[in-house]
Image (spheres, helix red, strand yellow):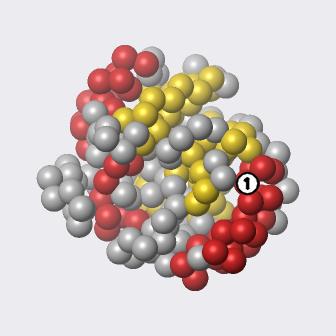
């Protein structure tokens, strides 16, 4: 498995291309991601959103149109793809597949993908696992967590999500929506601090 990462736009939101078994999966295409994806994905099969905030979904609709592939979005964040309270000119997009449930296992053209629902930063905020990688969006960063003071955020939900995250018996590299990579194990050690801080 090969992972390409490019920070997009003023918010430096990580867009990822995961290449596995000759197929490419696009995760969180933000501002201006289309050209980079078109240049770096040889056989794209799906677009996945960790959550619905504008800086992670800006190029959804353009890539759907250009590539003719399905968009997978956590169900509880689908409404955020219609409009943004922060960026009124965000291009709206419509998911082809709504992902729901605390843990959802998907087979996308032979590629095993797992969504884990960790609300708090947003109602549908999720992580995405492919192989030995977890893409955490704005749930968990290196030594930090997603903000809970946005519209539709919930500090209570974030605390519960962090408690569940601490119990994961997984040894995977963690690729967040902003900043550099870390590991699940490393961030599990930091989680108690954030549970008490928020």
Vertically, is 3 above or below 52? above
Q: Residue furthest right?
A: 169
Q: Nearer the viewer, residue 21 or 62?
A: 62
What's the residue at 53%, 72% (across, down)?
120
Residue 90 image point, x, y percent: 20, 52
**Where, quadrant-wise, is the N terminus in this rendering?**
top right
Q: Judge left or right: residue 54 versus residue 107.
A: left
**Where, quadrant-wise, is the C terminus in this rendering?**
bottom right
Q: How many marks?
A: 1
Residue 152 image point, x, y percent: 39, 76
Q: Residue furthest bottom?
A: 156
Q: Judge left or right: residue 70 versus residue 121.
A: left
Vertically, is 190 above or below 133? below
Residue 17 in sight: no
Q: Residues within 10 Å of mark 1 (few under 14, many from 20)?
A: many
Residue 38 image point, x, y percent: 34, 22
Q: Judge left or right: residue 124 versus residue 71.
A: right
Q: Secondary structure at mark 1?
A: helix
Residue 144 image point, x, y percent: 61, 56
- Quarter-wise, where is residue 75 in the image? bottom left
What's the residue at 30%, 30% (across, down)?
34
Residue 51 in sight: yes
What's the residue at 43%, 34% (across, down)?
7
Vertically, is 147 above or below 197? above
Q: Which residue is mark 1?
A: 187
What's the residue at 80%, 51% (across, down)?
185
- Quarter-wise, where is residue 174 in the image? top right
């Amino acid at each position: 498995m090969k992972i390409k990462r490019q920070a997009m736009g003023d918010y430096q939101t990580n867009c990822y291309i995961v290449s596995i078994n000759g197929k490419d999966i696009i995760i969180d295409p933000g501002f201006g991601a289309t050209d980079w994806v078109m240049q770096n994905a040889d056989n794209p099969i799906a677009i996945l959103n960790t959550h619905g905030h504008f800086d992670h979904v800006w190029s959804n609709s353009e890539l759907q149109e250009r590539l003719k592939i399905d968009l997978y979005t956590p169900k509880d964040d689908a409404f955020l793809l219609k409009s943004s309270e922060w960026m009124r000119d965000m291009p709206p997009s419509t998911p082809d597949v709504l992902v729901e449930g605390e843990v959802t296992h998907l087979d996308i053209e032979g590629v095993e993908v797992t969504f884990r629902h960790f609300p708090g930063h947003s109602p549908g905020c999720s992580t995405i696992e492919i192989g030995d990688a977890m893409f955490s969006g704005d749930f968990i960063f290196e030594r930090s967590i997603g903000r809970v003071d946005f519209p539709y955020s919930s500090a209570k939900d974030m605390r519960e999500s962090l408690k569940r995250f601490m119990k994961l018996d997984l040894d995977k590299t963690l690729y967040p929506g902003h900043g550099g990579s870390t590991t699940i194990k490393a961030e599990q050690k930091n989680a108690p601090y954030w549970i008490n801080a928020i």
